[in-house]
Amino acid sequence: MSRIVTIGAAQSGPILREESRSAVVERQIQQLREAHRQGCDLVVFPEVALTAFFPHWWIEDEAELDAWFEREMPGPETQPLFDEAARLGIGFHLGYAELTFEGGKKRRFNSAILVGKDGQKIGHFRKIHLPGHVEYRPDNPFQNLEKRYFEFGDRPFETWRAFGGVVGIQICNDRRWSESYRLLALKGAELVLIGYNTPDHIPEHPHMDRLTNFQHQLCMQSGAYQNACWIVAVAKAGIEEGVSMIGLSSIIAPSGEIVAQTKTLGDELIVHACDLDDSKAYQELFEFGTNRRIQHYGPIATQAAAVPPP
Ligand code: ING
């Protein structure tokens, strides 16, 4: 038996700092229509997909910072995306900067949502692993101020029954942490959706630059295989506000094989008919319930918090 879900990875080229959300949504609607022509059930857009990746630069003024965030999802500028997706009968994943008021205080998160074919929200996730720094680093050619502009995600990795299977979300740096896959796999994930904005240069570790593409693929191919899941990872790519970011949006099978990958650094859609039953075969191979011997792993394996440094 097969459970095919046809998925489009809708890679975004650079978004100009002054580009309006409406203009970006129009680009995304064009990708939705192409995905519909290719028979997609689900389209995956990148992390912070509605604007340039503003953590790459210093923002002092609070009102200026808040302007990069969405106070409602959908809001007036994103409603057309929801409407067109529902009209076409396509679900989608969208990464965005979330501004909300909870517990009487303003909260800012690097977030993503999963929306069904009927245009209704199914899932919502807030990025847990925030890279970057709080302070301005004058020697760096660009910043990564995610720790300054976002709070750490305050919800667990979660899965939702959707598109005929079990779906989970990670955001960008989350994909570099093995826990991100294992926690979703232990909650039955057969398909993991990931948006990312990944520079091809790490100012603090320039010697790692030559391995950027390799390590981007390595963490996801091993995550897919070791956790018996499909991965659809989608870039905001190209030179955006002077920061050169990788493409290599990829659709990865539970075998660990990359079955589709973008070739450009612009807006580009890749499509693959993913058989979610392929996940079942690898779940049987690993038999988590039987073969994982957590009782023999020792206390470290059951500790929730990271071990404090010596
Ligand atoms: N970007 C990068 C990412 O995790 C990074 C930051 C790059 C961290 C390379 C470590 C190594 O792909 C975001 N937005 O998380």
Image: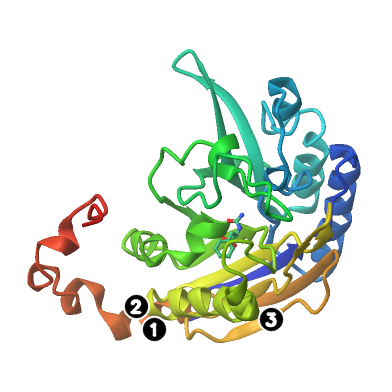
For residue 283, the mark is 2
| Labelled pair 1, 2 in contact (Cβ < 8 Å) | yes
Local packing at callout 1 (Cα closer than 10 Å; few below 14, some 14-19, many 20+) is: some
Q: Position of residue 286 (x, y in %)?
A: 29, 81
Q: Amino acid at mark 3?
A: Ala
Q: Amino acid at mark 2?
A: Gln
Instruction: Calculate the distance from the C-alpha at mark 1 to the C-alpha at mark 2.
Output: 6 Å
Local packing at callout 3 (Cα closer than 10 Å; few below 14, some 14-19, many 20+) is: some
Ligand 1 - quadrant of the structure image? bottom right
Local SS, label 2: helix
**Residue drawn at x 55%, y 87% as measured from the top left:** 257
**Residue drawn at x 88%, y 52% as measured from the top left:** 27
Instruction: Calculate the distance from the C-alpha at mark 2 to the C-alpha at mark 3.
Output: 22 Å
**Residue drawn at x 71%, y 79% as measured from the top left:** 261
Mark found first going from the N terminus, 1 or 3:
3
Mark found first going from the N terminus, 2 or 3:
3
Q: How many marks?
A: 3
For residue 281, the mark is 1
Q: Amino acid at mark 1?
A: Ala
Q: Position of residue 202 (x, y in %)?
A: 62, 64
For residue 260, the mark is 3
Inspect this view and state whether residue 281 appears. yes
Q: Quadrant of residue 204?
A: bottom right
Residue behind label 2 places its C-beta within 8 angstroms of ligand 1: no
